[in-house]
Amino acid sequence: MANNQVIHFIKKLKPYNIQKGLRYLKHYGFKEFCVRLSERMEPEEVPYGPWYEQYRAKPEDLMKQKQHSFKHQPLISIVVPAYHTPDVFLRQMLDSLKDQSYQNWEVIIGNASPDDSHMRSILDEYAKNDARIKSVDIPDNLGISENTNAALNHASGDYIGFMDHDDLLAPDALFEIAIRLEANPDIDVFYTDEDKVSTDLSEHFQPHFKPDFNLDLLRSNNYICHFFVVKRTILKQVKGLDPKYNGAQDYDFIFRCTELSKNIVHIPRILYHWRVHNASTADNPASKLYAYEAGKKAIEDNLARSGEKGSVSMRSDYGFYNVDYALTDQPLVSILIPNKDHIDILKQCIRSLKKKTTYTNYEIIVIENNSTEPATFEYYDKLKKDGIQVLYYPESGFNYSAINNWGVKNCKGEYLLFLNNDIEVITPDFIEKMLSNCERPGIGAVGAKLYYPDNTIQHAGIIIGIGGIAGHAFLNLPRARSGYLHKASLQMNVSAVTAACMMVSRKIFDLVGGFEETLSVAFNDVDLCLRIQKAGYHNVYNPHVEMYHHESKSRGTEDSEAKARRFQTEIEFMRTNWIQLLKSGDPCYNPNLTLASWNYGLRADGKGVKPWTK
């Protein structure tokens, strides 16, 4: 380890971290434990602690917020189930509410330990000094769902937020909700970014910077979690929390609320602090193994209500899941592979397809583009004898978009799989996994997880704005690692995927007009995916489809003046056509995260979402 890593490691050697490490070693085994340890010990490019202090709401910000004159001040109720809450935790939770810069709120504590004299004394003290603080006695501890529902019955707010008894709200949390409601009173649901805080509140760490609403990510993990606020009209329809899902009651509740919501707003600011201590799930995920089974049930029931069929399995990472969707049909899939010479690469690609593909109803079409080597055409003759079609693109020069558009016009498949000639199959049922996603209502393009030959990641979805226009997430991350909050290994919606391995239905491809032929080399896949997204479809990154991409890491992008000019023209096309998205940011990413690299690190230039300060 480097010196700074050693120092970082020593700082982390606290008793509960050692205990936690031993639990993880037992659960994951030595090899996987070492991978996870190296991830945790890797120093942050931009340390979160100082970053948080710099961008949290300052006293002067909060003063401006308190002085803001609202046209309408909706009442926000905060519901907190509590059971033998330690005195200091209870006081700090209540103080975080009293410190809010927005004043029209109430908190209802569902006290399931009314005989606890310490709790009773504190609750009476706070209620006496502030009429907004109320408690409801629950004589028998009914479990977290029913305790929450008992408190909910006494909430009178226009919006209801949910909070744990040992956590904290940032002082501007409720203001950031109210100011958005002033602009748009039709918002159904809010959620915010969050972090973890040490027991003594001395350290903020492990921030969770979230994307805008992302259903496929939500089915992989309850990424919404805290702070969740829902409109009363939605709450009435879902009828509170369901004790059938105890341990994952919030997961099920979030699913049911978002299913009924038309306007879901994500506030990209750290507004909730999840306290870590020995008894909390934040620090000891193994303490609630039953909760992860309940989470699996919550996903399964969401699928059923949505009319989708799929099998849900728990990952070794606590609280994370895989969803394999069921095929609804066995349509013809056309695999389109542009090629010019380099038959050694093409042979490897074709061989892996023929040897490993388990789906049977597909056709392979090689689109020949101005090859010159006799060996190439000899190989084509062999392919034809094996039932593989070879189409001869009639134009000169290289235009990836035009070549593939021409190929689509001359193939028969109901679904199109665009594949580079330097792809090698790893996952035998890759067509089934991609097709089952494509068949889902509302899904557009589906992409895969691609590796360089040295087993580092080449593609794990595309983030708009990285590198100026767009870039691959987790580029060069070792295959064994799963990245920021396991996102390299989770199925989720993304704004774009690479056409090196991309499936889309012919219907949607034709609807958006195919590839943009102005983009002959770069960004044509990004542009296609963005037009699909603009048409109302969601694109999917499926990490359970794995391929080798034998593209060279060191390959020069532009090695001549003409290529450099062409590339600049394509950049300008993307800027012109997608300037609003580039300005507003990728909805599948977070504006507080960097656009300078591919690892979900913090944005250091201060252009993230700052406190409201008008």
Image (spheres, grey):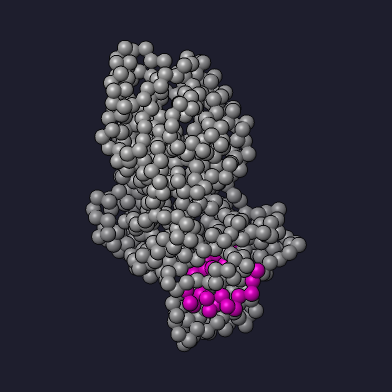
Residue 338 can be seen, yes or no:
yes
| Above or below 205: residue 447 | above
Residue 165 can be seen, yes or no:
no
**Quadrant showing the N terminus:** top left
Q: Nearer the viewer, residue 512 or 106?
A: 512
Which residue is at a point 57% across and 45% down the rendered structure image? 536
Which residue is at a point 50% across and 51% down the rendered structure image? 214
| Above or below 359: residue 173 | below
Whether residue 233 appears in magenta in the rendering, the answer is no
Residue farthest to the left?
30
| Above or below 486: residue 447 | above
Give residue 478's position: percent from left, percent from top.
Answer: 33, 41
* Picture quadrant where residue 288 is located: bottom left
Marker count (numbered): 0
Image side of residue 256 versus residue 579, left or right: left
Give residue 456's position: percent from left, percent from top.
Answer: 34, 37
Q: Nearer the viewer, residue 60 or 480?
A: 480
Image side of residue 376 versus residue 472, left or right: left
* Picture quadrant where residue 304 is located: bottom left
Image side of residue 37 versus residue 125, left or right: left
Give residue 190's position: percent from left, percent from top.
Answer: 58, 59
Give residue 364's position: percent from left, percent from top.
Answer: 36, 30
- What residue span does the magenta drawing correspond to? 145-173
Whether residue 148 appears in magenta in the rendering, the answer is yes
